[in-house]
Image (cartoon, helix red, strand yellow):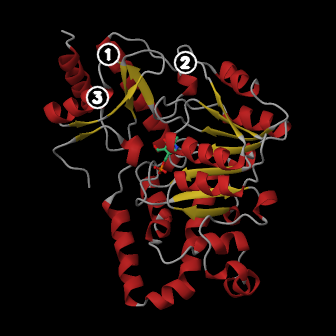
């Protein structure tokens, strides 16, 4: 559906949904409007189960441990509402976490008297050992919860989540893994990683319809785990789950008032569509996207005369490239790339200086030709001859 007049180089922010998936969503919308009563009372539950199964196989989680919410921000907010924070508790985040997720935690801390501890992760250079050391060094016997990304947003670091979760589990700290860049982005293995909670978007790298993320909750925490928005059955849940034949956890999240469930109903279609591009399915697609990301990063670094910041071992299909234009406002550069070159890009501030950085995030529709064009455009704007 992408505008052919635009060089779209920012898949990472909002994804891009193929026509085939949108068509499937429209078919569901029409079906619902033909008999909404039937849908919301009977069909909804099994339709959501289909998505739960498809997503569960992709990220190696048991389907029944997954529910759907509108986006990763909502996934985080729902987890925070279910963690019983007390005055004096500490909640760990890193300085590279997504602002909306931190904001939800900050408010919970303000309301409960818990303390938000922001870990000062290293940058340029950054490596796995120092990330693990920085986070574990801030764990105390008051740490209740640690939230960190699988891939950080504006810095594009694939965090050593396997090590972090194992060490935090060992210290009795609950983990909230923000895998907004997760399904369809990098291989995920919930069973092996064993976080307490994990949320991740379907509308980014799975190219599903906008407004769908999963929320995984460890079985030990599902009892009494409830959505922020309670629906009709909240205080009659036993009878309700007798009717819909599922856990209270699944039931309460599957229906949270009358809303658009069609983004949740096309997850399997998105997985099938993405898996159909290469014989090796989504695994091959993820590998190719990562390879193009590294090639694009090298090309841009070469053209701009800067060095890569993040080691390849800490990259998925997203990477940032420093731009030698001290003092240039990232928003101005983004707007000029669009106005003068029709390039849609993600320009972010360098957390270690006053230069802008470009974040690349190639998906199947991107080409190296587009990155060459982008490198020339940036050189002309920032004055590299
Ligand atoms: C790491 C991370 N977490 C959370 C989000 C929020 O995603 P959403 O807007 O779908 O809630 C993003 C979005 O870019 C992100 O990069």
Q: Nearer the viewer, mark 2 or mark 1?
A: 1
Tag 2 secondary structure: loop
Compared across the picture, whether 204 is left or right of 373 comes to: right
Q: Position of residue 172 (x, y in %)?
A: 84, 41
Q: Say whether mark 3 is within 8 Å of ligand 1.
A: no
User: Which residue is pictured at 74% across the width and 87% down the height?
Assistant: 239
- Say which of 136 and 300 sits in front: 136
Q: Position of residue 119 (x, y in %)?
A: 65, 27
Which residue lies under the disc numbered 1?
A: 327
Which residue lies under the disc numbered 3?
A: 371
Compared across the picture, whether 215 is left or right of 34 comes to: right
Residue 14 vs 351, above or below: the answer is below
* Mark 3 nearby-residue class (10 Å; few <14, some 14–19, many ≥20): many
Tag 1 secondary structure: loop
Residue 270 vs 356, above or below: the answer is below
Q: Nearer the viewer, mark 3 or mark 2?
A: 2
- Say which of 231 and 18 sits in front: 231
- Say which of 296 and 150 sits in front: 150
Quadrant in which the N terminus is drawn? bottom left
Residue 119 vs 3, above or below: the answer is above
Compared across the picture, whether 80 is left or right of 21 comes to: right
Quadrant in which the C terminus is drawn? top left
Q: Quadrant of residue 188?
A: top right
Query: CB under 8 Å between callouts 3 and 2?
Result: no
Q: Nearer the viewer, mark 1 or mark 3?
A: 1
Which residue lies under the disc numbered 2?
A: 123
């Amino acid at each position: 559906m992408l505008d052919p007049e635009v060089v779209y180089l920012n898949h990472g922010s909002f994804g891009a949904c193929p026509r085939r998936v949108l068509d499937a969503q429209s078919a569901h919308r029409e079906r619902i409007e033909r008999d909404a009563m039937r849908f919301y009372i009977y069909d909804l539950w099994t339709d959501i189960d289909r998505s739960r199964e498809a997503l569960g196989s992709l990220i190696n989680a048991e389907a029944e441990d997954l529910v759907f919410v509108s986006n990763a921000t909502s996934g985080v907010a729902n987890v925070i509402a279910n963690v019983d924070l007390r005055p004096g508790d500490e909640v760990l985040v890193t300085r590279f976490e997504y602002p909306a997720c931190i904001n939800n935690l900050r408010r919970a801390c303000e309301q409960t008297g818990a303390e938000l501890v922001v870990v000062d992760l290293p940058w340029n250079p950054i490596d796995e050992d120092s990330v693990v050391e920085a986070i574990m060094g801030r764990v105390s016997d008051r740490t209740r919860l640690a939230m960190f990304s699988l891939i950080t947003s504006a810095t594009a670091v694939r965090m050593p989540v396997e090590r972090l979760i194992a060490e935090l589990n060992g210290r009795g700290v609950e983990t909230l893994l923000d895998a907004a860049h997760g399904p369809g982005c990098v291989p995920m293995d919930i069973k092996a990683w064993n976080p307490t909670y994990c949320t991740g978007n379907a509308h980014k790298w799975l190219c599903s319809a906008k407004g769908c993320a999963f929320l995984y909750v460890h079985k030990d925490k599902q009892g009494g785990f409830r959505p922020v928005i309670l629906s009709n059955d909240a205080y009659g849940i036993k009878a309700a789950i007798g009717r819909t034949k599922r856990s209270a956890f699944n039931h309460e999240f599957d229906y949270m008032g009358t809303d658009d469930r069609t983004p949740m109903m096309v997850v399997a279609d998105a997985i099938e569509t993405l898996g159909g591009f290469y014989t090796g399915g989504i695994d091959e697609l993820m590998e190719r996207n990562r390879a193009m990301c590294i090639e694009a990063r090298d090309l841009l670094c070469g053209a701009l005369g800067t060095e890569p910041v993040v080691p390849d071992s800490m990259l998925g299909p997203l990477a940032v490239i420093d731009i030698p234009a001290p003092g240039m406002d990232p928003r101005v550069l983004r707007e000029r790339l669009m106005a003068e070159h029709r390039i849609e890009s993600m320009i972010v501030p360098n957390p270690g200086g006053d230069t802008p950085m470009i974040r690349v995030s190639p998906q199947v529709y991107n080409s190296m030709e587009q990155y060459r064009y982008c490198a020339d455009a940036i050189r002309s704007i920032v004055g590299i001859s």
